Amino acid sequence: MARVELINIQKSYGSVQAVKNANVVFEEGSFTTLLGPSGCGKTTILRMVSGLADPTNGDIVVGGKRINNVPIHKRNLGLVFQNYALFPHRTIGENIAFGLKYRGVSKSDAQEKVRHSLDIVRLPGVEDRYPQQLSGGQQQRIALARAIVIEPDVLLLDEPLSALDANLREDMRVELKAIQDRIGVTTIFVTHDQSEALAMSDKIVVMSAGVVEQIGAPDEVYNTPASEFVATFLGASNLLPATVAGRNETGVIMETPEFGKTCVPVARSITLGDAAKGQLMIRAENLHLTKASITKIDSANAVVEAVDYQGQLARYFVRIGNTQLQAINMISGRPFSAGDKVNVSLIPEECSALPANDT
Amino acid sequence: MRVWSLLKTYTVMVYIFMFAPILVVLLLAFNSSQFGGFPIEGFSLRWFVKLYENDAITRAFRTSLMLGALTAIISTTLGILAALALVRYEFRGKDLITTFLITPVLVPETVLAVGLLIFLRWLHMPRSFGLLLLGHSIIALPFVVLVVQARLTGIRRDYEEAAQSLGASPLQTFFQVTFPLMLPAVFAGALFAFTISFDNITATVFWRPSGMETVPTQIFGMLRNSVSPEINALGFVMICITVGVPLLAGMLARYFSRKKI
Ligand SMILES: Nc1ncnc2c1ncn2[C@@H]1O[C@H](COP(=O)(O)OP(=O)(O)OP(=O)(O)O)[C@@H](O)[C@H]1O
Ligand SMILES: [Mg+2]
């Protein structure tokens, strides 16, 4: 177990900057997720920590020691690949015991450790089978067992669940998290699936095009996104151009043509700074639709344009003047239908203020 | 319908044309007659006995086996190293080296043979078994490289990366993971090399030191005097080796891979 630090890490492939100046701390025993769209540099960071790629610049520190020049086989890291990479010519037992050979573990101890790790991943008794004889989910567990049996300082997982089907993925997600809690190993998890990231992580590192956009707890990045990218990448949001109409001790007053003046709390307007223009961010689930009535404060009259019915939820597309907004509401009684006139209201404490969109 | 039967007949004819001479040799090897030819007079193994008692032939046989085995070892070792470099590493001049490794297949054997001979003459080196071995290895190398390279390309890097992350050094990774995974190709490449060397005559005629005979050059020499039935027997043995060895190897490989799965 160890704390991992990336200090000014940068990686270029020719003219492509895969990672631009990243500074991230992975706390000892924590579960941290690298989240971002395809090609944003998640795998590259993982490969640099594991030693499969050398950073162009910067330092990687594990447990207080700079390890840039330590070759991969001396780093004591557990690596789990998207395609599992179980050795096809070795039995499950031999696969799991592979790393123990290089750690001077005796044969009988190794056998015991293999059995114990198979218990942990809840697949006892498969030692003598070959990888091809197991299902995808089972192979995934073996890959995990092989990585944790060596008691690594850090566990690195690159989209380990993406090759599984949806149901299995959710089960494995819960199980993986439980195993990590139990053994308490510092874990770096790569995914581009936001629900995976939100459900499992102690901390999420949101990345875009090689840049770390925000680091924070799941509710932090979800509720107080640091940038427009984070706001739109996680969940469904509405971003309305706004002017700053004033500031007081409780918050910033953002004025929009749709909702008039909205007072956003200070804690939710940090990245705005003292700019005169910005954007009002409202999560789709924080816009509430009610039957059109007298206009209350912090609300507007709108017309439902489309409905996406999802069982207990419905996603509505509503129009206020020239602006289309998304709202996700629980359904109580009958859902609204296209053409209905409704009143759309928000709660200012649930809104955020972001810097203006320059482009 | 007509077209199909025509095509069928044609195909059968082509096969007869290709295999009839071989069949003739196989049959005549057992003919008891002194003057090899049809009709076959009786079944006999006497030509095989004669073959075994012929010192020149057994010597040529030993030379060929030795040459083939050494060629297989050398070209396979070099072939594995070359394939590893070409598939797993990026370096300047890679395309050039690939071309260079493959050229011996494209250059006519006579040209290659004369070229090497002139080169050695320039170095003032006499013809020797070593030269012959070197030459055969050059001829066999491209085949080994191609076979091993194809296999290696199919082995995902993940396996090697996983092994290293678990603590295996690059060398240990090679012997524990890469080599076992490419073993079928290594095996095939080695057999290929052996057969190529065992069959070779053109280049061998140029390169062998005086007095040394391989099986093909021995047969060639004997044919100049007369067509003795012994040659049919020898042909039979050669066909058995060059066809039988790869078949056997294929069967073994299948047996072992089945046992595993
Ligand atoms: N070996 C390489 N050579 C050249 N460019 C590379 C190499 N590896 C990655 N890149 C580039 O670096 C960038 C980041 O790649 P990376 O694999 O880290 O993305 P990722 O976030 O893991 O994406 P994904 O979700 O698709 O796996 C991409 O633009 C990619 O094209
Ligand atoms: Mg990736």
Image (cartoon, rainbow, N blue to C red):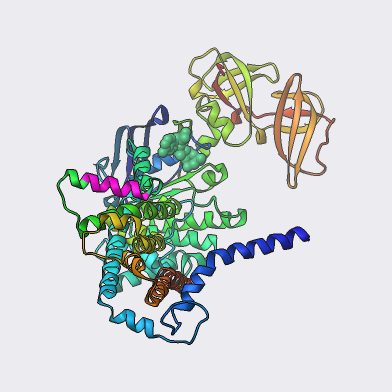
User: B242 or A97, which is in the foreground?
Assistant: B242
Instruction: Decide if residue A165 is on the left or right side of residue A119.
Output: right
**Where residue A195 sits in the image (x, y, percent)?**
57, 44
Examine the rendered structure and indicate whether residue A142 appears above or below residue B106. below
Counting from the top left corner in percent of width and height, residue A264 is at: 58, 24
Relative to A231, does residue A64 appear above or below in the rendering?
Answer: below
Relative depth, front residue between B188 and A194? B188
The foreground one among B139 and A204 is B139
Q: Residue A35, can we see it?
A: no
Residue B65 in view (yes/no): yes
Residue at the spot 36% in from the left edge and 48% down from the top edge: B104
Up-down relation of residue A217 to residue A260 (above or below): below
Looking at the rendering, the stretch of residues picked out in magenta corresponds to B109-119
Q: Quadrant of residue A164?
A: bottom right
Instruction: Please tell me in which quadrant of the rendered image residue A240 appears.
Output: top right
Using the image, determine if residue B11 lies above or below residue A58: below
In the picture provided, is B179 more to the left or to the right than A36?
A: left
- The image shows residue A157 at horizontal and vertical percentages of 44, 49
- The C terminus of chain A - image quarter: top right
- Based on the picture, tell me whether residue A94 belongs to the magenta stretch: no
Residue at image position (43%, 29%) is: A16
Residue B175, given in percent of the width and then of the height, sits at 31, 60
Q: Nearer the viewer, residue A102 or B26?
A: B26
Residue that extends furthest to the left in the rendered view of this protein: B124
Tell which quarter ligand 1 is in.
Answer: top left
Residue reaching furthest right?
A339
Left or right: A301 with respect to A155? Answer: right
Secondary structure mainly formed by the magenta segment: helix
